[in-house]
Amino acid sequence: MVTTFAYVTLALAFLLSVYGLFAVVWGHFNQSNPWLESARLALLIIFPLVSISVVILVVLLLNDRFDVTYVYSVTSREMPAYLKLTALWGGQSGSLLFWSWLLAGFSTFFGFRKNWRKEKGLMTWGMLVIFISLAFFLSLNVFFEVPFERFWHLAEGGQVISVLQPPGAFALSPQDGQGLNPLLRHPGMIWHPPALYLGFVGFIIPFALAMGTLATGRKDQRWIDIARPWTVIAWVFLSLGLVLGMRWAYDVLGWGGYWGWDPVEVAALMPWLTVTAFLHTALLQKKHHSFHRLNMVLIILSFGLIIFGTFITRSGVLSSVHSFADSKVGQPMFFFMGVVVLGALGLLFYRWGSYGGLQEIDFKFSREVLTLFTTVTLLSILLVCFLGVIYPVVSELLTDNQITVGPAWYERILGPLFVLLLLLMGVCPLAGWGGSIIKKLGVGIWWLVGISLLVPLLAWLLGNIKELYALVTLWFVGLGILVVLAEVVRDVQTQQKRQKTKDFSAFWKPLARKHRRYGALMVHLGVILMSIGILGLEGFQQETQVKLALGEEASLNGYQFTFDGLENYNRDDGVNISEATLFVSRNGQDIAELTPQRQIYFNMGLAITQPSVKSSLAKDIYAILVEFTPGTQDQATFRLYVTPLVNWLWIGVGVLTVGAMVAILPKSRKQQEVLS
């Protein structure tokens, strides 16, 4: 049986992870290189074994093997192939298998490191951490959420679900499956979970290296050097995962926005905040050979929050459109989270005294001070988010009634912190290590400040924008963009003076020589551009809900929305569609035709809305069909939105991603020789 074979390979991978765990411990305490090498080889074999299980499950999904319970629960015959592939991570057991596969893949890269023998102590303890993680996540698929169970009909009557065939039983194969949740049938779901998982799982290597450093008592920067590219890669995927989730919510959920401060959304944001802080404070450790404690705390906090977010999503503790309701893994995952976090903190406290006292930094306009301010701001945002996530759990424990805090609570508290963070990102490039760069700019800094003030001034005069938050944010956005441009211009002018020429190489050479710095500038620029989109939705969006008769129109922000009809029909896959037509015009000129829908999936007893959007760089025009009277097509209720600038959010993500890829490019041999 192919399902039995897939389960056996998965079980072998679990047994190898357990073997590797004991082999590392035995090899370390007995100073046995053969045992350590055996553990490393076991680490390399796990990934192919899990890959076999993943490939088999994908084949089962694509071939409509409804006798397999997981295939039955997440696919149906009418689903296209790409959605059947998406179903791999559309359910609990499949997504856990996908998670374990990615974890095994990253672990393989760890085992393949060329300098593994040179960093024997660091890698040995890091491998121990990886084996513990692999053993836990593989055990979830082997013992709790098995994706290869099948339906069996017993000889004496009745049905049973099992991987192995019971005596005298025969396979039971339904004619069709239940199908994937309609909310997940969106192209964004092809990329959102994998990107998010890559961000979560990819952080295992920095965490393992940090724990290896603590276990060996090393005080050098080697673990930072090795962990840096892996941290950036994990951060990029985590960023993409968050934003792709935003895009999915914007296109599918009908919120009129991309972020609802749902507990699962916030739980995914929290490790992003701590990893972002670590990427900044790691530079402090490189520059000053200090801040070891702070970086270790951030590493432990980041990995702990990743497991916490996974627990929130998979345990069913909190109700969310993003979470799995039924779960067998809540208690094991809570136990694992406690063991890992408490163990890591215990190791840190054991080494606490060996990392010296607090580092003293002069309080002046310098990169060090701004980095610390940025870290404090990020951790303040984290604290608010954490309190918002756990409040429903605490309220249920104390009052037996789960109370969830809403978007207004988050926005009221976090608004000033996000504006401060935007300011810090804008001015940080102006500061050098020790505070020297701003002096080089001289009077130029006042030109930048003055020109950037024109942005909120024009918004106030021409755009009739009066809100203080919006005007201040626009000022910081303008300042941030101008600072990045000024940095590029300054470097190009310096290069032109050196070369005594004005050809294109004057731009290219600084970029090639200082690509990591320019990558960081692009990341900052990407976040600033994203903030334009966020400001457009949070500050300038206009909305209304109207009930329109056929031919009647409603106005919003200078646009006229005319209800032109409602069509009801059944698709071949058994889905009932009610589609309205709205003509959008402005000043008598046709702008767009919007067709929002209500979709009813009879086989699942589920109804969803499908918004319709007309997008441009300037604004989005967004319509949702809220309700209508069945059997009539001459009246319907709509929720209408006009959202300026929101597409700059997605543009900013592209800039951020390119910048991060530039930042992790290896240094050239010539640069390495200069640094050495």
Image: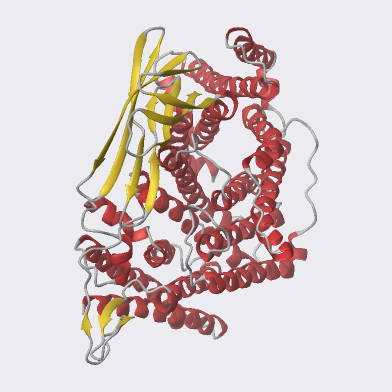
Q: Residue 659's x, y, as percent?
A: 47, 35
Q: Quadrant of residue 84?
A: bottom left
Left or right of 571 in this view: 118: right
In the rendered view, would you say 526 is above or below 346?
above
Q: Colour scheme of this structure image?
A: secondary structure
In the rendered view, would you say 38 is above or below 403?
below
Q: Residue 281's x, y, as percent?
A: 65, 46
Left or right of 449 in this view: 607: left
Residue at the front extreme of this rendering? 631
Residue that appears at 52% across and 26% down:
544
Residue 216 seen in the figure: no
Left or right of 557 in this view: 393: right
Left or right of 573 in this view: 533: right
Quadrant that contains the N terminus: bottom left
Q: Residue 420's x, y, as percent?
A: 69, 32
In the rendered view, would you say 471 is above or below 313?
above
Name the one closer to the observer, 84 or 227.
84
Residue that appears at 52% across and 85% down:
26
Residue that appears at 58% across and 52% down:
263
Count the labels in the image: 0
In the rendered view, would you say 528 is above or below 283?
above
Q: Residue 299's x, y, as percent?
A: 61, 57
